[in-house]
Image: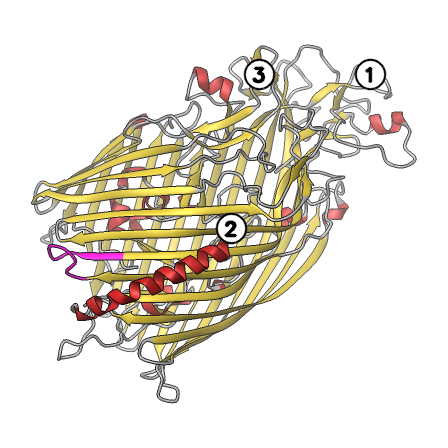
Amino acid sequence: MTMRVLRGSLIASVALLPGAGFAQETAALDEISVVATTPVGASSGSGYGRRGAASGPFGDQTGRPVEPRLRAGALPLYKIPSTVETVTAAEIERDTGTFNAVATLARITPGLNLSDSQGNNNRVDVNYRGFTASPVQGIAQGLAVYQNGVRINEAFGDTVQFDLIPPSAIQRIDIVTGNPIFGLNALGGAVNIQMKNGFTWQGTELTVLGGSDARIGGNLEYGKQIGDWSFYFNGDGLNDRGWRYQSPSTIGRIYTDLGYRTQDSEFHIIGQFARTYFGAAAAAPVDFTRVDPRAIFTYPQTTTTEMGTLQVTGRVDLSPTWDLSGNAYFRRFSNQYVDGNDAEFENCSTRSNFRGRLCFEDDGFERAPGQTDAQFRNQFLMLGRGTPANGIPFTAGVPYGTLDVTKTEATGYGGSLQAANRDRVFGFGNSFVVGGSIDVADYSFKSSSTLGVINPDLSVTTNPNNPTYGNIPGLGTEFLRTAAALGIAPSSVIGSSLSMGLYVSDTIDLTDRLSLTAGARLNFSRVSAVDQTGFSPDVTGTHYFTKINPVAGLTYRLNPGLSLYGGYSESNRTPTPLELACSNPDRPCLLPNSLVADPPLKQVTAQNYEVGIRGSIPNFYDGGVLSYKIGAFRNDLANDILQLSTPGNAARGYYVNVPATRREGIEIAGEYSRGDLSVYANYALINPTFRFNGELSSPNNPLTDEGEDPIIVRPGNQIPLIPNHQFKVGFDYMVLPGWRVGMNLQAFSSSYYRGDEGNQLPKLPAYYVLGLNTSYQVTKNLQVFGLITNLTNNKYANFGTFFEPGLVAGRYPVNDYRTTTLAQPLSIYAGLRYRFGDDPVPMEEPVIRKY
C-alpha cells in the first residue's frame, strides 16, 4: 500500500506544479514559521526567531523577506523534510475547561486519536500514526516527549504523564516526525513542548472555572520582565468527582521560570512541582455499562503521582554564526497504584498436601521435569507474612479479592550540550548542528498484595473481624505469595538506566530553492536491575543497547507558498526495565504487580519514509490565508514489543518481540484564516498492521477455547485500537466584537479490541464527538468563557479488551466477554478570566496555521 501512497503523493505534487506560476505572482508571505529540529533548540530561551524575540515577521528595509537569525537547532518549516504539527497557546486556551493539553492535540492534529483505558480524560493514551505515549506502565511507548529540551518519558516504563504539565503554561507544542536527533522512542515522532517564560508572557491573569461532575478549578499566571531579568509563575488546581463512580480527580501543579538575558546570551532556572490523584482506572464489563454507563468494575483503583523538577537552560552566541546552548536537570518522580482485584484463589487440590487451605490457581503453569503431581500442586499454597507453614484456611463461598499495590520511584538527572553554526559553505547557505546528551536515572519498583474480600458493591477491602484478611497484628498477611513465589509474590527491584547520545545534522541550501538535510544520532543505553526479595533472582541483570540512526531528506521550495519534502530516517526504542524483567512466558508476571524473569529482549528498530507537499496561499479569499498539506508516510518496525497474557490465567502476562509491524498512511489538511474567521479540516488514513505469521496468547479472547489455544496472526492483520479513518473539522468565528464562537467535530472509524490481534471478532463501533466553545470580552480586563464537550451526548468507547465472563463476587452474572471504557458524556464548563492592570485581555483572533 505504502509505495502506491508514496507514488500517488509525488504525482499529486507534480500535478500542482502548473499552479506554481499563480502562487509565484502572489505577495511573499510576511511570516516564516520556524520549528525546533533538536530538543535543545526548544529549550534555549524565548523563541525560535531573532535574539530574544519570538518568531514572527522578518524583513530588511526594502520589505523583502530575509532569513531569520535562527536559534540553535531551529529551521524554517519549508526546510524540514518531514511533517510538523503545531499547537499554540491560543488553541490550548480554547479548551480551558478540560484542564489538559491532550484534548487540544486530539481536537486538531491529523492522525492523532485518544484511547481511554483509564476512564479519565487526564490519563489517556495518545496515539499518533499508530504510536503511543501513555501514562500506563506496560504500554509500548513509541513517541519521545520533551519539555524545554528535557526528555520526560519516565525512567522505569518510558511512560508519559501529560497530567503533570499545566496547560496554560505551554507556549507551543510541536510534533516532529522522521527525526532521530530526538533520541530514544522517536519511532513515530517526537512531541516537543516549549513552556512560557517572563520574556514571552507578561501580566497577571486569574482564571476560575466550574462545571459538570462538580468540577472546580483555577489558575494564576504571572509574568514580569525588568530590564534583562524576567520571572514567570503558573499555578493551577482542579478537583472533581469524575463522570464514573469512584473516579475523583485532584490536580495541583506549579511551574516557575527565572530568566536573564543579554544581547548575546540567555539563561533560565526552571522549577516545577505537580501532584495528581485519580480513581477508577480501568475498563468495565459491557454487561455493567449497558445498565449504567457510569459503572466500574472492582475498586479501589487509585493512582497517585508526584513529580519535582529543577532545570537550567542557557544559550550563548559565540560569534555572529556560532551558538552554544544546553540544559541540565534534576527530576524526582513517584507513582503509586492501588488496585482492588478479583483473586484467582481456590481450594487446594486433592492432589496436594494442603486440601482445605487457600491456593493460587495453577492452570497457567506446567509441571517442571521430574516434579511429582503433589510437588507441582504444593507450590501454589498461599502464604502471608507470619502465617503458619500450612497456609491460610479456605472458606467456601467467600468472594476472595486482593488489594494490589505498586510503587515506582525514580531520580533522574542529566543534560544536553549543542553547538550550531550558520556559516555559508562554498557559497551555499548552511545550518550545522552537533550535540550530545546524557540521561541517568536510579529507580525502584515495589509491589505487594493483601488478601481481601469483594463486597456487594464490588469494593475490595480487608476484614478486621477475620484474622486471615489484611494486616493483622501477629499475622501480617499483607504480603501474599505462593509457596514457590509463582504467579503472585511481593517484588522489590532497584536499578539504574543510562542513555547517551551523540548527534550531528546539517541542512545545506544546494540552490535558493533546494535544501538537503543529512545527519545521524548514536544512541547508547544501559539498563540494570537487582532483585531485592530473593524470589526472582533472574530479574538481576545488565543489558546494553547501541544503534546509529541516520536521517536524510530533501525539500524544494517552488515559491514562498508551496514546497515539497521527502525523507528517510531510522529510529530505535530500547526495552524498558519493566519489559526486560517480565519477558519469560514460563514465569509470567501478575502485571504490573510482579517482576519475575529476565530473558533478553531485543531493541525495537524502525525505518521511516515520508513525502509530501505543503504551503500557504495569501489573499486566497477576502484577504484570508489558505494553508494546506498532503503527505504520506510509512514506518517499518523490526522486533516490536507486545504485552501478552498467559494461557489459563489472563491476569498474568509477559512481553515478547514480534518480527515486524508497520504503520503507513496518508494525511490531508487545510485551514483558512482571516481576521474574524478560522476554518480547518483534516483527514488521516492510518493502516497499522502486523507483518508476520505467528501465534499470540490472548486467553480471554472467546475464540481461544478458554485460553488454551493461541490466536493466529497473519501479515496484514490490523493492530488493535487504531481507527483507520480519522476526520476532524472545526471553526472559530468572531460573531461580534469581543464575542467568539467555535465548534469542532472529530469522527473515527471502527477499530479492533485489544486482544483481537487476529481480527476475528466484531470491532469497537465507529464514533464521532462534537464540541462547542465560546468566549466574550465583558470589559477590557474581564472575559467569560464556556466549553461543552460531547455536545450530542454520544455514548461511545475508544478502548476495549476482553475478560473472562462468569459470576462476579458470587452474585453478579456476566455473560459478555467484552469490557470497555465509555467516553465522557456531555459536560459543560464555564469560567471567568481576569487580567489585572492596564493591559486588557488580548482580543482573541483565529490562529493562522502554517503547513
- Return the residue at label 3: 815
- Return the residue at label 2: 663
- State which quadrant residue 514 falls in: bottom left
Looking at the rendered structure, the kind of residue marked 1 is: Arg
Could you tell which of marks 2 and 3 lies nearer the N-terminus? 2
Q: Give the residues in magenta.
A: 618-627
- Image height of 318 relative to 244, above or below: below
* Residue 620 is covered by the magenta coloring: yes
Q: Nearer the viewer, mark 1 or mark 2?
A: 2
Label 1 residue SS = loop
Point out residue 238 in the picture as x, y percentages from the top left corner: 33, 36
Looking at the rendered structure, the kind of residue marked 2 is: Arg
Point out residue 837 in the picture as x, y percentages from the top left corner: 12, 51
Label 3 residue SS = loop
Label 2 residue SS = strand
**On-image quarter of the C terminus:** bottom left
Label 1 to label 3: alpha-carbon separation? 31 Å
> Which of the labelled discs sits on residue 355, or is there none?
1
Could you tell which of marks 1 and 2 lies nearer the N-terminus? 1
- Image height of 626 relative to 742, above or below: below
Q: Nearer the viewer, mark 1 or mark 3?
A: 3
Image point (49%, 73%), residue name: 519
Label 1 to label 2: alpha-carbon separation? 52 Å
Q: In the image, 346: left or right of 99?
A: right
CB under 8 Å between callouts 1 and 3?
no
